[in-house]
Amino acid sequence: MTLRISLRNGEPVIVNGAVLRAVGRTDLVLENDATILRGRDVMKPQDANSPARQLYFACMMAYIDPADLVRHQQVLLEKLEALLSALQAPEAKGVCVAFAEKVAVGQFYQALAECRWLIAYETEALARVAPE
């Protein structure tokens, strides 16, 4: 499967654990399987400050750190269970199920997209209940 990734000037990218930085606007074309994550998709530990963000961070770590996959998978399960128990909307629960299916077959990069949806959903839900 071919994957085309566009990087902004100075944007970092992780490829098989190595951190690279784009010099100028750069397009990369991956023509085989590799672990790749653009800088804009990397979450710092301190930014994992909500259930959906913690799930994203755990998934990202499972993806970029396969040497410690078993530990990351355990954290993923814990975070997914916590988030599922807090959600009530069927659509959000469905996204969690889609996420779990992708994780189960090792499609962590694709699972991150489901997490981004969950983060947006969580942000919107919290904004509705926040005092003005």
Image: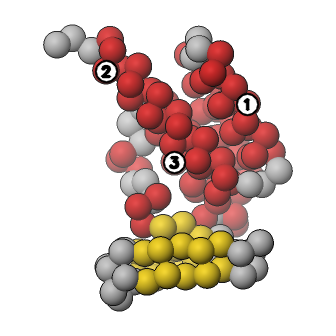
Residue 16 position in % (x across, y down) = 63, 76
Disc 2 crowd, CA 10 A, few/some/many (<14, 14-19, 20+)? few
Q: Earlier in the sequence, mark 2 or mark 1?
A: 1
Q: Which residue sits furthest bottom?
A: 23
Image height of 94 relative to 12, above or below? above
The residue at the point 77 percent across, 72 percent down is: 1
Residue 38 position in % (x across, y down) = 48, 67
Residue 72 visible in this rendered orientation of the protein: no
Image height of 37 relative to 2, above or below? above
Camera-nearest residue between 23 and 57 = 23
**Residue linked to disc 3:** 57
Disc 3 crowd, CA 10 A, few/some/many (<14, 14-19, 20+)? many
The residue at the point 61 percent across, 41 percent down is: 114
Q: Which residue sits furthest right?
A: 105
Camera-nearest residue between 38 and 3 = 3
- Name which residue type carries label 2: Ala
User: What's the distance in space between the residues labelled 3 and 2, CA to CA?
Assistant: 22 Å
- Name which residue type carries label 1: Val
Q: Earlier in the sequence, mark 3 or mark 2?
A: 3
Q: Earlier in the sequence, mark 3 or mark 1?
A: 3
User: What's the distance in space between the residues labelled 3 and 1, CA to CA?
Assistant: 18 Å
Disc 1 crowd, CA 10 A, few/some/many (<14, 14-19, 20+)? some
Image height of 85 relative to 112, above or below? above
Q: Is residue 73 left or right of residue 27?
A: right
Look at the numbered disc 2 and give the secondary structure of its residue: helix
**Residue linked to disc 2:** 127
Q: Tell me the number on the disc at residue 97.
A: 1
Look at the numbered disc 3 and give the secondary structure of its residue: helix
